[in-house]
Image (cartoon, grey):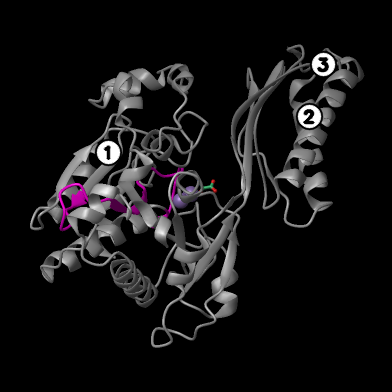
């Protein structure tokens, strides 16, 4: 818990926690985590996409690795736990194993993904996509609000974007991925449970839209004759809410809306907004996406506006590994076996990892159901329950993988949790 406070100090904005992709404070975060791991036999490094990795070796030099972690970047004016908590749980697991001088038949690697929120470049999951070989090099040309390309940002951080594709892991070298994350919603509070398990993660689509009309004088252009880009965008914002309310569990959000030129006495000639659309079923989300595209076009046509629509990312709804998920359902002595099984509306790196390696996601109760907000919090006893759950998960994984034999290794029979 104290470490969450320490890492929360590394922000690019005075007085709040904002740590976007490869911003300078991320170096400090990496140094702090390296310091905490220093007393353990862990090898730490930062990869070409800026992911922090700390590997605690297994009994066999090229044993497959269990990845435990989450992301180290944050949204603007974030809470202290979103992402960070999952990385620090990975650090605590390694410290526990090292204190017990315990080696497992697999390596344990804590991963602090460099970019999950998608704030700086609009597109999320850059770190986990890079680690799993799903990174699209075309993204390197994207520019941030200051016009800095992703490639320039990676070089400025001290890494080489040309090495991203080679830095990806091979499926056969990874046993699985486990992420611990605050629920960021109200369901564990309602169930009065400290932890819950995610069965699946809702899919998400993101886009940036620009309506263009005609800037003009606020005092001379009759309202009926205007091509007001902001009014068009505003009608689209309402259309998003209206559509979302017509469906169960459809989440439509316009997080940014920027008119220009942004002067009090000028009719906005341009308005740019972002769209984030989510649902647990891809067919429902895709249908809603097409409906919103039609509505945006109709609004633009009716108002003599032009419209550009740029997709920023598509993440299918993802099921998590049922067997590993079962292992996270803690034994009765932690809490009753009816640990809630939830579909996650929030996106997580686990949704990028799941198609690559068996993945599981353990939620920690959000007592005030708040996140993406400095008021975000977790309870120490719930974090302790989560750590105990993860350590029991590792016991079960160890039992499953027993002492490695060279023969087994050579055949690769025990690669990954395929036997699971
Ligand atoms: O947007 C999300 O769902 C996550 O917090 N990145
Ligand atoms: Mn988040
Ligand atoms: Mn998160």
Check residue 396 in the rendering and tell me which mark sits there, or answer none.
none
Q: Is residue 103 magenta?
A: no
Q: Nearer the viewer, residue 56 or 79?
A: 56
Q: Position of residue 110 (x, y in %)?
A: 27, 52
Query: Position of 189 compared to 157: left or right?
Result: right
Question: At 33% from the left edge and 51% from the top edge, which residue is drawn?
Answer: 415
Q: Position of residue 148 (x, y in %)?
A: 40, 18
From this view, report whether residue 420 is shown above or below residue 335.
above
Q: Nearer the viewer, residue 363 or 281?
A: 281
Which residue corresponds to mark 3? 227
Q: Residues within 10 Å of mark 2 (few under 14, many from 20)?
A: some
Q: Nearer the viewer, residue 253 or 417?
A: 417
Which residue corresponds to mark 2? 293
| Secondary structure mainly formed by the magenta segment | loop
First along the sequence among labels 2 and 3: 3
Q: Position of residue 358 (x, y in %)?
A: 44, 54
Locate the N terminus and report the quarter of the image it occupies. Answer: bottom left
First along the sequence among labels 3 and 1: 1
The quadrant where residue 254 appears: top right
Q: CA distance from mark 2 to mark 3?
A: 20 Å
SS type, badge 1 = helix
Q: Position of residue 219 (x, y in %)?
A: 79, 16
Check residue 25 in the rendering and tell me which mark sits there, or answer none.
1
Please state the extent of the stretch shown in magenta in the rendering.
Answer: 55-82
SS type, badge 2 = helix
Question: At 37% from the left edge and 71% from the top edge, which residue is drawn?
Answer: 386
Locate the C terminus and report the quarter of the image it occupies. Answer: bottom left
SS type, badge 3 = loop
Contact (CB < 8 A) between labels 2 and 1? no
């Amino acid at each position: 818990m104290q470490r969450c406070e320490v890492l929360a100090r590394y922000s690019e904005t005075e007085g709040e926690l904002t740590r976007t992709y490869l911003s300078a404070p991320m170096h400090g975060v990496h140094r702090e985590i390296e310091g905490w791991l220093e007393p353990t036999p862990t090898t730490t490094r930062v990869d070409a996409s800026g992911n922090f990795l700390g590997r605690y070796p297994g009994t066999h030099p090229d044993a497959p690795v269990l990845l435990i972690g989450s992301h180290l970047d944050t949204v603007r004016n974030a809470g202290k736990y979103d992402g960070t908590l999952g990385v620090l749980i990975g650090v605590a697991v390694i410290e526990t194993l090292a204190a017990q001088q315990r080696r497992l038949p697999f390596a344990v690697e804590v991963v602090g993904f460099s970019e999950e929120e998608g704030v700086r470049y609009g597109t999320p999951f850059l770190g986990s996509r890079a680690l799993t070989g799903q990174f699209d090099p075309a993204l390197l040309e994207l520019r941030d609000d200051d016009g800095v390309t992703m490639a320039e940002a990676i070089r400025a951080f001290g890494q080489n974007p040309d090495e991203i594709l080679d830095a990806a892991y091979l499926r056969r070298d990874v046993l699985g991925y486990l992420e611990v994350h605050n629920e960021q919603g109200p369901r564990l509070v309602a169930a009065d449970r400290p932890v819950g398990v995610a069965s699946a993660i809702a899919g998400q689509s993101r886009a940036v839209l620009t309506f263009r009309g005609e800037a003009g004088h606020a005092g001379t252009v009759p309202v009926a004759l205007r091509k007001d880009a902001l009014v068009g965008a505003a009608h689209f914002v309402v259309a998003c809410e209206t559509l979302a309310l017509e469906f169960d569990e459809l989440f439509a959000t316009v997080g940014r809306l920027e008119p220009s030129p942004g002067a009090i006495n000028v009719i906005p000639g341009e308005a740019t907004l972002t769209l984030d659309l989510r649902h647990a079923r891809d067919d429902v989300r895709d249908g809603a996406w097409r409906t919103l595209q039609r509505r945006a076009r109709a609004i633009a046509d009716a108002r003599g506006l032009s419209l550009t629509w740029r997709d920023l990312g598509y993440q299918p709804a993802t099921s998590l590994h049922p067997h590993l998920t079962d292992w996270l359902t803690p034994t009765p002595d932690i809490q009753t076996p009816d640990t809630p099984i939830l579909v996650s509306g929030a996106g997580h790196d686990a949704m990028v990892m799941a198609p690559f390696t068996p993945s599981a996601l353990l939620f920690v109760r959000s007592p005030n159901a708040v996140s993406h907000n400095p008021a975000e919090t977790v309870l120490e006893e719930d974090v302790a329950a989560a750590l105990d759950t993860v350590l029991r998960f590792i016991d079960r994984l160890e039992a499953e993988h027993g002492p490695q034999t060279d023969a087994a290794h050579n055949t690769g029979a025990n690669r990954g949790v395929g036997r699971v």
